[in-house]
Every structure is written in C-alpha cells, then in structure tokens.
Image: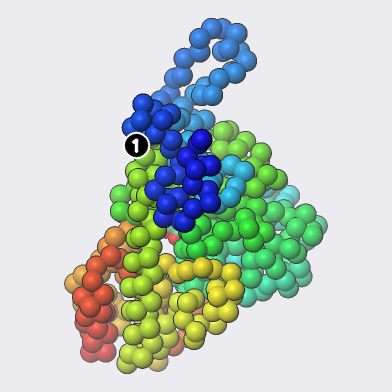
C-alpha cells in the first residue's frame, strides 16, 4: 500500500506527516534520499533510445523532487505537480506554457508585483497582451474577455491589500470562453483553499513561504488538472527550471510541520488583527477573516482558514506625511524584522508599495503596512506594534 492510499482519507496533519515518501521504497528510512543528479545511467543502448525507465536526466525529476511533488499533488488534488527554483518561476513557467504570440492574458490588478513585471517586461516582447482587472469583478469578467483571451490569472487574497476574488464565478466564465484559469494560492496554501476544487486549472504556490517555512529556501510548485498538465509539463521540461535537491528535501521536511505552524500563524494573526481594529492610529485592518473586511463573505464561503500576513492602514490624513509616518513605524520595531517575503517563523513588516495599481487603487486613509506574524509570543508582537504606532504618532 502506498503512503498516499494509506493517508488519503485521514486528517490533514496525518497526511502532512506521511505523504510524499513511502519509507519502504528506500530501505525503511523515514525521509527520502537527497539525490544530487544530472546523469542517470541506462542499462543498455536500446533503453537509452526508448528512455523506457523511470528517471532519465536530473532536470526531469529525481526521487527527491518526486517525493515533494507527489506530496503537493495529493494536497492539491492535481493531475501533476512540478517543483521550480522560486515562487516567481512558478508564476512565469505556466504563463510561458499556456500563452503564445497574439494571445491575451487577464491578470488581477492586486497581483504580486513581479508577476506584473513579467507580463509587461517579457510577455509583451513575445506578443502577449495583458490587461488588468478589478479583483471584485466576479462573473463580470466576461466583459473583458476577448476571442484571443487564453488565460485568466487570479490571486486571492492579494498579498498586500488582501482583496478576495470570486474564483468559481471567474472560472465558470473563463471556461465558457475557452480560457484557462491560474491562481497564485500562496496565502491560503492547499490547507485552507484548494483551487482545483473551485474551477482553477493551474494552482501556483510560492512554497518559499509556508511549506519551506524557515526563510532559508526559495522554491515554487505548480499543480495542474488533467487539461492543463501536458502544457505545464512541456514548459517545465523545455525551460530546465528544476528545483534543487536540497531545497526540495527541505521543503518536504517543512511540509511535515506546516499544519501546526499554520494553526499558530492563524491564531496569532487573528488575535493581533482584531486587537488592531480598535487601536488609535490604525484607520483600517485588511484581513479577509475579519467581519469588517469587504471580501469577508467570499473568504467565509470558500476558504477554511487564514494564514499569517495582513495589513494595517495607518491613520495619516496628510498624504505628504505617509512615507515619513510609515518609516517612523518601521524604524521603531524591535522584534519585527524589516524584510520582504513571509511564511517564515519570524515576524516581518514592510511599507507596501502599491504604486503599480491601475484598477484596485490603494487605500486613501494612510500608508499600508504589511505584517507577517511569525511564531513569537503574541504579547511581545503587540508591544512591538504599539511601539511602532507611538513612533508614527510622534513623527
Ligand atoms: C503572492 C506571492 N507569489 C509569489 C511570490 C514569489 O515567491 P518567491 O519569493 O519564492 O519567488 C511571492 C513572494 O513574495 C508572493 O508574495
């Protein structure tokens, strides 16, 4: 019995503990081997020509990357999963695999900024046109679909201002017009939202964040349904963008504890977000699990949990003072680090740059500070945030 069939009916933490690697496949060792590989030998020239063996070359997969991708496959419920060297590569490779010159791409305006850079900086050069849509558009996305629209890219919630999207409604319309749907699902992970169950064809994960979980690994995964898998696999194999063996191993190792870490991230983040709703100096808290958040109903309908980043909008009426107040907040922090990324064990803060927005415009009340809530004690983090708010008030 494979580890998949043993655990597919069990609770999520049981699955995370056992999925991906069957110890009996490698001498009983609980963890998979870290296979560093370029060359794979063939037993004879006939097999070399037919390539009729499980592994043929390092770029196409090894027992280590297979252990990770089969674990993600089981969590996503996908036909196939590939592991790539970063979350950004996990966005760009499916775009390259599904779009051709003359095609049109629809991308949500609250998208991760480097995704937008890729669209105008590279896809445009190859003759693919991108338009940006309002995250709240839902089924009205029909009005933006053209005969040559081949892909609708979603990301929910957005990773700075946390706009939710009606994914099933968008997927239904896109499919009716022959377009595929991709989703950057990094915030929720497949534990809190399973994109393929909601009509998405290609689920993208910056596994750098919660699966790896320790701010030391860059890695991405892309999982596709039956329809999108051949194009995804082809692009992956042609581009040679395979994840490294040590990173794949570390990410599978991270998955084992992802459920318990996410529980902790979720609880601490909600406690802090709720406390900040009534805090002087905070105009608004942007967190989909808060009843006050505009996208809350969608989150409640489709998601089964929330993770560890959200934003606060500082209450700063004078636009000219936004940057100075944001910097005063950040510079007063003693526990939160100032840094990009998220999903690690340590708390981080950043002044969100929303200058690229064309449709989903930034909040007007003040600067947006994104907080990644790590595994530290909530009281210490709250005291740190209060230090930041005091400094912003004084600035
Ligand atoms: C929503 C989202 N998608 C993708 C990425 C890219 O991940 P990576 O840093 O692994 O390239 C990030 C990184 O911050 C992100 O926030």
Examine the rendered structure and indicate whether residue 342 appears above or below residue 232.
Answer: below
Residue toward you, 25 or 107 = 25
* Image-quadrant location for residue 391: bottom left
Examine the rendered structure and indicate whether residue 292 appears above or below residue 340.
Answer: below
x, y percent for residue 12: 46, 56
Q: Is residue 106 left or right of residue 389?
A: right
* Image-quadrant location for residue 52: top right
Q: Is residue 276 left or right of residue 171?
A: left
Instruction: Tell me the SS state at disc 1.
Output: loop
Confirm or reject: label 1 Cβ below 8 Å from ligand 1: no
At 32% from the left and 58% from the top, the residue drawn is 344
x, y percent for residue 207: 43, 51
At 58% from the left and 33% from the top, the residue drawn is 238
Quadrant holding the C terminus: bottom left
x, y percent for residue 111: 53, 64
Residue toward you, 38 or 134 = 38
At 78% from the left and 54% from the top, the residue drawn is 178
Residue toward you, 224 or 282 = 224
Examine the rendered structure and indicate whether residue 107 appears above or below residue 215.
Answer: below
Residue to which mark 1 is pinned: 30
The quarter of the rendering in which ligand 1 is drawn is: bottom left
Whether residue 121 is visible to the viewer of this picture, yes or no, is no
């Amino acid at each position: 019995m494979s580890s998949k069939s043993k655990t597919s009916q069990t609770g999520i933490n049981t699955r995370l503990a056992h999925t991906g690697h069957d110890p009996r496949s490698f001498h009983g060792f609980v963890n998979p081997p870290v296979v560093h590989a370029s060359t794979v030998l063939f037993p004879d020239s006939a097999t070399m020509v037919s390539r009729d063996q499980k592994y043929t070359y390092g770029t196409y997969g090894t027992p280590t990357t297979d252990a990770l991708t089969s674990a993600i496959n089981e969590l996503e419920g996908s036909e196939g999963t590939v592991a790539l060297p970063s979350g950004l590569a996990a966005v760009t490779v499916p775009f390259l695999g599904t779009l051709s010159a003359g095609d049109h791409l629809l991308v949500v305006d609250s998208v991760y900024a480097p995704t937008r850079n890729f669209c105008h900086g590279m896809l445009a050069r190859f003759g693919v046109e991108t338009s940006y849509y309002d995250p709240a558009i839902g089924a009205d996305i029909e009005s933006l679909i053209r005969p040559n629209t081949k892909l609708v890219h979603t990301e929910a919630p957005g990773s700075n201002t946390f706009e939710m999207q009606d994914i099933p409604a968008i997927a239904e319309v896109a499919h009716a017009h022959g377009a595929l749907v991709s989703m950057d699902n990094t915030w929720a992970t497949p534990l809190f939202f399973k994109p393929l169950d909601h009509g998405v064809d290609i689920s993208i994960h910056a596994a750098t964040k919660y699966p790896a979980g320790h701010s030391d690994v860059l890695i991405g995964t892309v999982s596709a349904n039956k329809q999108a898998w051949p194009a995804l696999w082809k692009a992956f194999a042609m581009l040679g963008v395979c994840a490294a063996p040590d990173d794949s191993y570390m990410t599978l190792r991270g998955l084992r504890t992802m459920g318990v870490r996410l529980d902790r991230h979720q609880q601490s983040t909600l406690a802090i977000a709720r406390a900040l709703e009534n805090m002087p100096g905070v105009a608004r808290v942007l967190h989909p699990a808060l009843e006050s958040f505009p996208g809350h109903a969608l989150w409640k309908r489709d998601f089964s949990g929330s993770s560890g980043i959200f934003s606060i909008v500082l209450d700063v009426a004078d636009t000219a003072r936004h940057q100075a107040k944001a910097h005063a907040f950040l510079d007063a922090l003693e526990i939160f680090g100032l840094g990009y990324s998220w999903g690690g064990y340590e708390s981080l803060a950043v002044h969100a740059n929303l200058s690229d927005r064309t449709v989903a415009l930034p909040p007007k009340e003040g600067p947006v500070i994104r907080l990644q809530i790590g595994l530290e004690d909530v009281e210490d983090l709250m005291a740190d945030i209060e230090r930041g708010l005091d400094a912003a008030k004084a600035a």
